[in-house]
Amino acid sequence: MTSAIGAGVPAPGRPADLFWAFSWLSLQGFGGVLAVVQRELVERRRWLTNAQFVEDWAVAQVLPGPNVCNLALMFGDRHFGWRGAAAALGGLLAFPLLLLLLLGTLYAQHADHPAMAGALRGMGAVAAGLIAGTGLKLLAGLRSHALGLPLAAGASAAAFAGAVVLRWPLAAIVLVLGGSTCLLTAMYLRRRPPP
Amino acid sequence: MSAGDWLQLLAFHLSVSLLAVGGAVTLAPDLHRFLVDGRGWLSETQFGTSLTLAQVAPGPNVLFIALAGWNVGVNAGAGQPDAIRLALAAFGMATSVFGVLAPSSLLALVATRWSHRHRERLAIRAFRQGMAPIVVGLLLSTAWLLAQAASAGAAGWRPWALTAVCTLLVWRTRLHLVWMLAMGAALGAAGWV
């Protein structure tokens, strides 16, 4: 159905594979599912390369709606149409939802335990590291970018500085920085047609 | 809650779905204005707890809307037998989740199918590739903000050290993420970070 799935490249065999894959990764996604999505889809199952993953992620991020849900829908739809999209989204939501309802019920009884607050803080620090490490891996994946690694990494650094140092709103970063990077990429792509 | 109230709950979630650019958490202020301040269907504490628990629990953050909807149903069934409260809670959750996901999911499917059909066009290729570095930069800034939040109120360098060690482990090794989270939870519970 698509050029993204070449011969001999691993791919999910049926929608149920998607459901279980997304269930499994979603249940590991504390403090954000993205780090786990990259680990599962790219590194463990090899259903995507790093470069494909970043491109899909970019589209999922720009579209309205929860980013990981969009990514699951896109990925599922590409493989099995709407059945795949439903399987991936269902996997992403079903078990974590049950777990969350259970937690919500339990939490009401143990809300003011000091070890609980400490554990949450520790997991927050780890979640930051998971996302940072994934970001560094994806940064290395920009090697195959049309702009070349130095320029592409420079654009990443600018987005980081815009968000953290200058505290620009997301819309400004996406429109101004994203817009100019897209224009620059278009110029590079036009000069050097695809192989 | 009357049938009209349930319809309003659904209509509200449908109407904010397409506003969730940059993640579901950006909807929290709007949801608060409607559910807590506007209708009083949810208490301040219930709203705050729903948001915090969903952030901490595994799974996409959009699930905080599911938990909020569940609590709306629980409140609607106050004084009723348990079975009816449970059914109302499940109904509130399903209404909220469906409302907030249906429009954005349809748009995502239509947009990706369209862009896939036209994937050879220069504009599409430039968009997909051009946004990639920006998304990576934003990801790193999310990590930065999370690390800052984790170290707020804690003693000095330790949370940062934990974050740095995990960054290296994720980047350079294939250690399973669950072990790192367990380590963080244990260190935090023991009071080290």
Image (cartoon, helix red, strand yellow):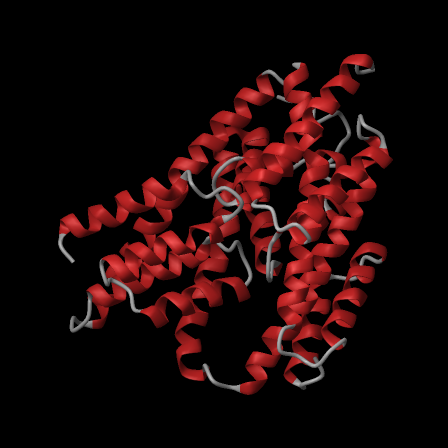
Residue A96 locus on image (x, y percent):
50, 59
Residue under the point 35% across and 58% down: B32
For the question of whether residue A13 can be seen, the reply is: no
Look at 49% across and 30% down and name the residue there: B109
- A123 above or below A15? below
Q: Residue at x 63, y 39 (%)?
A: A57
Give the x, y percent position of residue B184: 69, 73
In depth, the one of A169 and B124 nearer the eye is: A169
Q: Quadrant of the C terminus of chain B?
A: bottom right
Residue A144 horizontal/vertical position (percent): 83, 31
Q: Is residue A108 left or right of residue A127?
A: left
Task: Point out residue A70 in the picture as x, y percentages from the top left corner.
Answer: 53, 39
Task: Farthest residue to the front: give it.
Answer: A166
Q: Residue at x 67, y 41 (%)?
A: B135
Q: How many marks?
A: 0
Q: Quadrant of the N terminus of chain B?
A: bottom left
Q: From what the image shows, is residue B55 above or below residue B157?
A: above
Q: Quadrant of residue B148?
A: bottom right
B164 and A155: which one is in front? Answer: A155
**Image quadrant in which you'd find residue B162:** bottom right
Q: Is residue B156 left or right of residue A72?
A: right
Q: Is residue A119 visible?
A: yes
